[in-house]
């Protein structure tokens, strides 16, 4: 017996430093999808059955569902590198400026509800980093943009109506990267600092207050190193701005103290940071009302919050080295590499929080500040693509700060709007306890009245159980001893408890549920005959009484072998007659059972990813099936669901076509199927058919693996889907469950991801 008790686990942040490109994500997704060695399995691994048993609460009759989601702002630029959020046109509403690697500057004007395109400039030279401030003293926000290939950093002056023209220039040399803005010589004018990792040096342009520079001075990084990131703020708390440079080569911070004269540029000391410092930001996280120096130590998996710096001894150092400053600090531990961050109150309690972009994990990490200093329990917000840089500000004018994050993939900026309670709208992410979470099922496994989800992955031998009222806390795990290719819940022994059929490398595992309220346990059943199996790649699984003998049977697709393995049950629970193999070919990846031929017997429909069709296997009795029909659909069909979409009493089908980006809805007739295709986003997955509007009509929910969006095709009962609301979801979406997790009568959406260790929960906010 596999016994386990509930144990809460803290959700993990997965953090990546740096700029990213589209091809890198595509490669990552493909690698996750390719099962073992064959590229042909690209679609097949994502093709597991996503149907879920049990009743799902319906929504208000006749109304489309409403899920709590972030806003996604399309900028029209596909290669983002950086952005700036500010009120550029003086209307007291936040606007946005975006630069792209294609050399474009786009100004997006906000109206409190959306953004519209304003000025559009081609500036070329690989613009890579930007900052803002009033450089010409006219009271509006100007921009400074690093153009790495042009070897220049330029001021762009605002005319007060969000129209920009070039001002002063720093000839930054090759390889310029990051930029920081602040008054370094205490003359009342903004100065600009630019990092040059390849030099290594920093260039400081001292502003003249009129949109140009009085001088541009190089600052050598003492002892060499790599000047990656930099920031300007009062690190020494003496009332003067300092320049702090993150030296990734030397695993240190270099501090250039501010000056009240023009002699700025002397090094005060270096700070030894545990791990490699990557990003530097100022903000009060200690609760003393003064800014702290917050450093992402990405190789040490933490943020270091420096609260006080002590000047070094004036004794000369042997060899003329840089003095080392001691400091007081505390750490904010994260389980993966931290990246760019902002400090501000986003939870509405008047206390500053840490808001961090988490790169490849496609999420934001919020570490809420607590009274007296420090932070409390972190939570994750799902993002489109790979978030690069956060901004904090009140966009919709409700008095609560919202959170922005630029996506490094696609043409979107994420915006999480805060409500009156300080809750940021959007999907929450929870750690699954697995390296990645490919497959997902849901049920009340321990019989305590609360639903749980169970997830598995072909990167691990464990199944992870997660539950909790309105959240997903890891409560236990089950080791099946093999990589997991699929999960299916069903009551195999008809005792009222949901059992599990697990598709594993080379066959299946059958787990009998022996749980009691508050305690999970499963027996791995010794099945007969011992040769039971489904080939090398068991994906789609169906459970039901297919032969009408009052016991439960199992059908499994074997992608590599090209067959459907039928495993007939017997009167003895968990004892099975010899399996029957139905050869279908074409890479079978999903299977559903229904009476498709109208003779009262349960037939099979099988999606064949390599033939782009659906095979209908007619039940001829005595566990014998023959292929009676091949229904053409889109390219690379995978997920397959059956329901009656047009209310004619016949079983219909819907299949997601991974390469076509569509779902095919197939209406059963006396002679076969007729159908229509509907757009479903790039690489549709996680297909489900449910009444989501409470009108008794079946709707379709489908997610996009590449974009993370999910769509609800609202059915009209006649085979049409006139409404298709779209919601931001989870990058790498693979499988999904709809269940009421918080007891409000509305089903929440939980989504697994092929590229992360998280399960995402999207709250249903439809009004009853």
Image: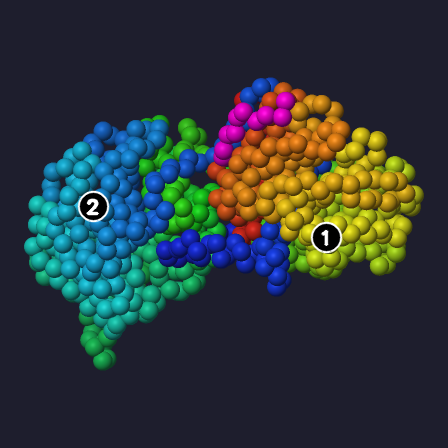
Q: Secondary structure at mark 2?
A: strand
Judge from the rendering whether residue 317 lies leftward or rightward of residue 590; answer left or right: left
Q: Is 720 one of the magenta-colored residues?
A: yes
The percent coordinates of residue 610 (x first, y second) are 64, 51
Residue depicted at x 63% and y 26%:
719
Q: Secondary structure at mark 1?
A: loop
The front one of 305 and 748 is 748
Q: Which mark is residue 143?
A: 2
Residue depicted at x 86% and y 40%:
620
Query: What distance separates the C-alpha of mark 1 from that of mark 2?
Result: 60 Å
* Badge count: 2
Examine the residues drawn in magenta and state their main secondary structure: loop
Chain part drawn in magenta: 718-727
Residue ID for mark 1: 585
Residue depicted at x 65% and y 49%:
611
Q: Which mark is residue 487?
A: none
Q: In the figure, 266 relative to 74: above or below?
A: below
The front one of 705 and 362 is 705
Classed neighbour count for the residue bearing mark 1: other residues with Cα under 10 Å, few (<14), some (14–19), many (≥20): some
The percent coordinates of residue 360 (x first, y second) are 46, 53
Residue 85 visible to the viewer: yes
Judge from the rendering whether residue 141 lies leftward or rightward of residue 449; answer left or right: left
């Amino acid at each position: 017996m596999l016994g386990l008790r509930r144990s809460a686990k803290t959700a993990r942040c997965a953090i990546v430093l740096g700029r990213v490109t589209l091809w890198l994500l595509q490669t990552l997704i493909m690698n996750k999808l390719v099962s073992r060695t064959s590229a042909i399995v690209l679609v097949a691994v994502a093709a597991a059955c996503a149907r879920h048993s049990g009743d799902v609460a319906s929504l208000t009759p006749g109304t489309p569902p409403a899920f709590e989601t972030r806003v996604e702002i399309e900028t029209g630029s596909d290669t983002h590198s950086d952005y700036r959020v500010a009120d550029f046109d003086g209307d007291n509403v936040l606007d946005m400026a975006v630069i792209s690697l294609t050399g474009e500057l786009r100004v997006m004007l906000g109206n409190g509800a959306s953004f519209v395109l304003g000025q559009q400039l081609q500036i070329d030279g690989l613009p890579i980093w930007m900052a803002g401030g009033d450089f010409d003293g006219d009271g509006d926000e100007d921009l400074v943009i690093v153009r790495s290939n042009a070897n220049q950093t330029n001021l762009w002056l605002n005319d007060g109506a969000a129209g920009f023209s070039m001002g002063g220039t720093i000839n930054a040399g090759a390889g310029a990267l990051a930029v920081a803005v602040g008054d370094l010589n205490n003359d009342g004018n903004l100065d600009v600092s630019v990092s040059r990792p390849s030099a290594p040096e920093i260039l400081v342009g001292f502003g003249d207050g009129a949109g140009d520079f009085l001088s541009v001075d190089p600052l050598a990084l003492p002892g060499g190193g790599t000047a990656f990131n930099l920031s300007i703020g009062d690190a020494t708390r003496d009332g003067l701005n300092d320049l702090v440079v993150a030296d990734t080569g030397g695993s240190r911070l270099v501090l250039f103290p501010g000056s009240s004269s023009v002699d700025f540029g002397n090094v005060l000391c270096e700070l030894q940071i545990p791990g490699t410092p990557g990003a530097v930001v100022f903000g009060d996280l200690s609760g003393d009302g003064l800014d702290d120096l917050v450093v992402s130590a990405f190789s040490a998996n933490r943020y270091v919050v420096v609260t006080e710096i002590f000047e070094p001894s004036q004794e000369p150092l042997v060899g003329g080295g840089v003095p080392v400053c001691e400091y007081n600090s505390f750490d904010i531990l994260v389980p993966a590499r931290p990246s760019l961050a902002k400090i501000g109150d986003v939870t509405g309690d008047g206390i500053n929080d840490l808001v961090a972009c988490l790169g490849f994990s496609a999420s934001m990490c919020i570490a809420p500040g607590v009274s007296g200093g420090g932070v409390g329990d972190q939570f994750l917000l799902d993002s489109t693509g790979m978030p690069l840089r956060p901004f904090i500000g009140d966009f919709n004018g409700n008095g609560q700060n919202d959170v922005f994050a630029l996506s490094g993939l696609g043409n979107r900026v994420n915006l999480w709007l805060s409500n009156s309670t300080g809750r940021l709208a959007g999907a929450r992410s929870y750690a699954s306890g697995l390296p990645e979470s490919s497959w997902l099922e849901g049920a009340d496994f321990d019989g305590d009245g609360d639903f749980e989800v169970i997830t598995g992955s072909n990167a691990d031998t464990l199944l992870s159980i997660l539950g909790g009222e309105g959240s997903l806390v890891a409560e236990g795990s089950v080791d099946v001893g093999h990589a997991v290719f699929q999960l299916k819940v069903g009551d195999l022994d008809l005792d009222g408890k949901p059992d599990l059929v697990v598709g594993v490398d080379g066959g299946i595992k059958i787990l009998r549920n022996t749980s009691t309220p508050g305690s999970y346990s499963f027996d791995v059943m010794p099945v007969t005959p011992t040769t039971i199996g489904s080939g090398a790649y068991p994906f789609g699984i169906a459970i039901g009484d297919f032969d009408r003998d009052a016991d439960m049977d199992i059908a499994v697709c074997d992608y590599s072998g090209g067959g459907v393995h039928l495993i007939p049950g017997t009167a003895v629970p968990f004892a099975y007659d010899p399996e029957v193999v139905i050869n279908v070919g074409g890479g079978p990846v999903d299977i559903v059972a229904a009476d498709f031929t109208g003779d009262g017997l349960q037939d099979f429909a099988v999606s064949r990813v390599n033939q782009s069709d659906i095979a209908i296997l007619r039940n001829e009795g005595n566990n014998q099936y023959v292929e009676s029909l091949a229904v053409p659909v889109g390219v690379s069909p995978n997920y397959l669901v059956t329901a009656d979409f047009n209310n004619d009493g016949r079983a219909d089908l819907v299949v997601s076509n991974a390469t076509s980006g569509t779902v095919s809805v197939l209406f059963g007739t006396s002679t076969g199927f007729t159908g229509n295709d509907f757009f479903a986003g790039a690489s549709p997955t996680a297909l489900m058919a449910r009444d989501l509007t409470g009108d008794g009509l079946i709707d379709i929910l489908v997610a996009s693996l590449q974009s993370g969006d999910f769509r609800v095709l609202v059915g009209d009962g006649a085979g049409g889907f006139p409404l298709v609301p779209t919601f931001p979801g989870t990058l790498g979406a693979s499988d999904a469950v709809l269940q009421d997790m918080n007891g409000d009568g509305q089903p929440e959406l939980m989504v697994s991801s092929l590229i992360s260790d998280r399960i995402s929960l999207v709250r249903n906010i439809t009004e009853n």
